[in-house]
Image (cartoon, rainbow, N blue to C red):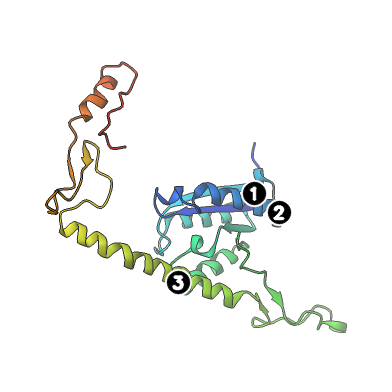
Amino acid sequence: MNYKYDCLLMIRVSTTEGAKESAGRDWQLYRGLAFAAEKLDTAQKNVLVQSEIWSGRDEQRPGLDQAFAQVKEHNIPHALFFDIDRFTRAGVMHYEMQKRKFAAVGCAIQVVKGIIQPATNSLAGTGGSFGDDFQYDWSVFATSEKAEIMEAQAAKDEARKILGRTVPAQIQNAQAGRTNRMAPYGFRNIKIVDASGKPQASKQVDDGGAFFSAPNFRGLGRRERHPNIVR
């Protein structure tokens, strides 16, 4: 059955590990659906959920482009994110550009944390005997604009701080011949420092891999657990 979508809930995590964290995919989904029901009066069946694993620092994000295409195709009035940093970490200019882009097709950006407020006309009530209220481009604005700008910049600054802590350590490990990530299939991670304190190679061939996979190729329909296999 096809439903009319009243809200697009966009869930973004930067890495597969990030999906398991406190603000991971499940929590964003839970809070997003609750916000849609309470604040937007939108039933779960009318919420189009989309996920992406992509860095918010990138201005070119296929997931965000797809979200815009869905909003435009289905005339969805609300695009919901957990927070502004889930929308973008690319800075104020990118935030404003994307927000205007969605607004141009009749879609308002919303965040679960409630920072973004709807735009209002500061000249409301001035119409009188003239009919409609006077309205200018400068008179229609959201009172949360300043807070939004600060949050968008803070999201970019936070990404810079995170990278500033992790990248130097990764460079140092790579220069010392150490692996920064999970060992590829067929290898396993080992201690990178021996008893003398000298750094050693941080992965080696996992001889147990064949023991793990051979039963599958023999069609036995079972997997043996090996204590050294990398999962």
In this image, 219 relative to 51: left or right? Answer: left
Rendered location of residue 97, percent (x, y): 50, 70
Mark 1 lies on a secondary structure that is: loop
Q: Nearer the viewer, mark 1 or mark 3?
A: 3
- Image quadrant assignment for residue 137: bottom right
Residue at the spot 31% in from the left edge and 62% down from the top edge: 166
In this image, 94 relative to 40: left or right? Answer: left
Measure the alpha-carbon separation of dots 1 and 3.
Answer: 29 Å
Q: Name the residue tied to disc 2.
A: 38
Name the residue type under label 2. Answer: Glu
Q: Quadrant of the C terminus?
A: top left
* Label located before the other in sequence (1 or 2): 1
Q: How many marks?
A: 3
Measure the alpha-carbon separation of dots 1 and 2.
Answer: 16 Å
Q: Name the residue tied to disc 3.
A: 91
Name the residue type under label 3. Answer: Gly
* Label located before the other in sequence (3 or 2): 2
Mark 2 lies on a secondary structure that is: helix
